[in-house]
Each structure stands twice: as structure tokens, then as C-alpha cells.
């Protein structure tokens, strides 16, 4: 989730840096995604008006985020249980192997060893696949929420006539804090 917020911070900062001051040369064309973050619709009287928003605070304050975290935690718990069951099966096979190895024919010992190696490889692959799947789910959940946050930031930006909006972490001093307004907008949806 931190990675997704960092991406938004970079998008906002890039868009703000590209804002054209009166009397300067035109800024280079912006990528399509940036105008949705911040535009240049501020009236001339507000040309220097700056806002800050604490994206992490907005993200954490949303019910949708809490619901997504709970769902993800449930998915993690479910996957952990599957992996635990696989580990227990391997442990039982290993215990059986050591208890009966002396009684089995060499061909059966080799078969059991191959079975154990395959089960351990399956566990490793499942662990990797599970991690990838859970990261994908997290990204999917958070990106949808972050897209909605950007829309709310853009609305507050337009309504307030701001020339620029920065993440709180990117601006040390100054700027109107619009975090509360963004949270209110998000809660109304």
C-alpha cells in the first residue's frame, strides 16, 4: 500500500512542477494521467495558492480501506492454513519415512524419497505463488481506493482554486491542508 501512495505522490509532484507560471514558456505536454491529478484551472488570483494533503491519513481513514485490509487479512489467513496443511502432510510423510525406511525395499525407499522431494518442491512453488497472488490482490484493492482518492483530491483542488496540491511529506512548510476535506468527500461517496 505504501508503494501505491508513493506513486501518487510522484504523480502529484510532477504535475505541480509542470504548472506554468504567468509569463513563462509553455510547459511540455503532460502524460494523460497527470491532468486528472491536478489541472491548471485555478483562477489568476489564486495562481500561487498551494494545498497539501496527507494521502496516508486519507487512505487509512476510509472505511473502504479498513474493509479491504480485513478481506486481505482473511485471504492471508486462509492461505496460511493451506500452507500449514501442506507442511503437516510433509512432516507426516517424513516421520513415516524415518520409521519404516529400514523395513522397506530399496525401490520403495527411493519412491518415498522422490515423493518427499516432490512435496517439498510443491510447497515451495505454492508459497511463491501464494505470495504473488496476495500481492496482486493487495495492489488491486489499493489501486481502486487510490484512484478514488485522486478524484476526491482533484475535486477539492478544483473547488478551492488551488494552483498545486502536494502530499504532506513532499512539502515542509506552507500550503492549505485539505486532508479533512478530501476525507469528507470520500465519506460522502
Image (spheres, rainbow, N blue to C red):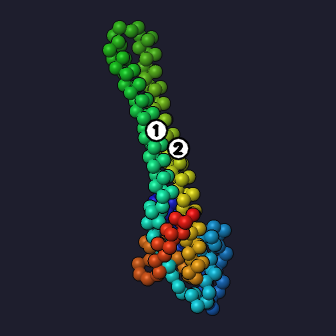
State if disc 2 and disc 1 touch (CB < 8 Å): yes
In which quadrant of the rendered image does the C terminus lie?
Answer: bottom right
When the figure is inspected, residue 59 is found, relative to residue 105, above or below; the finding is below
The residue lying at 46 percent from left, 81 percent from top is 175
Residue receiving disc 2? 133
The answer to whether residue 15 is seen in the rendering is no
* Location of residue 42 by image quarter: bottom right
The answer to whether residue 189 is seen in the rendering is yes
Which residue is outermost to the front?
188
Gap in angstroms between the C-alphas marked 1 and 2? 10 Å
* Location of residue 40 by image quarter: bottom right
Q: Is residue 173 or residue 31 the one in the foreground? A: 173
Q: Is residue 134 or residue 189 the one in the foreground? A: 189
Judge left or right: residue 99 versus residue 152.
left
Q: Which mark is residue 129?
A: none
Give percent across and percent down for residue 6: 49, 64
Q: Residues within 10 Å of mark 1 (few under 14, many from 20)?
A: some
Give percent across and percent down for residue 152: 56, 69
**Circle 1 sits in a helix, a strand or a loop, which is it?**
helix
Q: Residues within 10 Å of mark 2 (few under 14, many from 20)?
A: few
The residue lying at 52 percent from left, 76 percent from top is 165
Earlier in the chain: of badge 1 and badge 2, it is 1
The residue lying at 45 percent from left, 43 percent from top is 74
Q: How many marks?
A: 2
Judge left or right: residue 142 versus residue 101.
right
Give percent across and percent down for residue 61: 45, 63
Give percent across and percent down for residue 38: 59, 74
The residue lying at 39 percent from left, 20 percent from top is 93
When the figure is inspected, residue 99 is found, relative to residue 64, above or below; the finding is above
Residue receiving disc 1? 79
Amino acid at each position: 500500500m505504501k508503494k501505491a501512495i508513493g506513486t501518487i505522490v510522484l504523480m502529484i509532484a510532477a504535475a505541480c512542477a509542470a504548472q506554468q507560471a504567468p509569463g513563462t514558456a509553455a510547459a511540455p505536454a503532460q502524460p494523460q494521467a497527470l491532468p486528472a491529478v491536478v489541472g491548471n484551472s485555478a483562477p489568476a488570483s489564486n495562481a500561487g495558492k498551494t494545498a497539501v494533503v496527507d494521502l496516508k491519513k486519507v487512505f487509512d481513514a476510509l472505511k473502504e480501506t479498513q474493509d479491504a485490509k480485513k478481506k486481505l487479512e482473511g485471504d492471508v489467513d486462509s492461505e496460511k492454513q493451506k500452507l500449514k496443511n501442506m507442511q503437516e502432510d510433509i512432516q507426516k510423510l517424513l516421520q513415516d519415512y524415518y520409521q519404516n525406511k529400514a523395513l522397506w525395499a530399496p525401490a520403495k525407499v527411493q519412491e518415498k524419497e522422490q515423493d518427499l522431494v516432490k512435496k517439498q518442491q510443491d510447497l515451495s512453488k505454492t508459497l511463491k505463488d501464494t505470495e504473488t497472488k496476495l500481492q496482486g490482490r493487495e495492489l488491486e484493492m489499493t489501486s481502486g481506493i487510490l484512484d478514488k482518492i485522486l478524484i476526491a483530491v482533484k475535486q477539492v483542488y478544483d473547488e478551492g482554486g488551488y494552483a498545486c496540491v502536494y502530499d504532506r511529506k513532499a512539502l515542509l512548510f506552507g500550503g492549505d491542508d485539505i486532508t479533512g476535506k478530501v476525507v469528507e468527500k470520500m465519506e460522502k461517496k
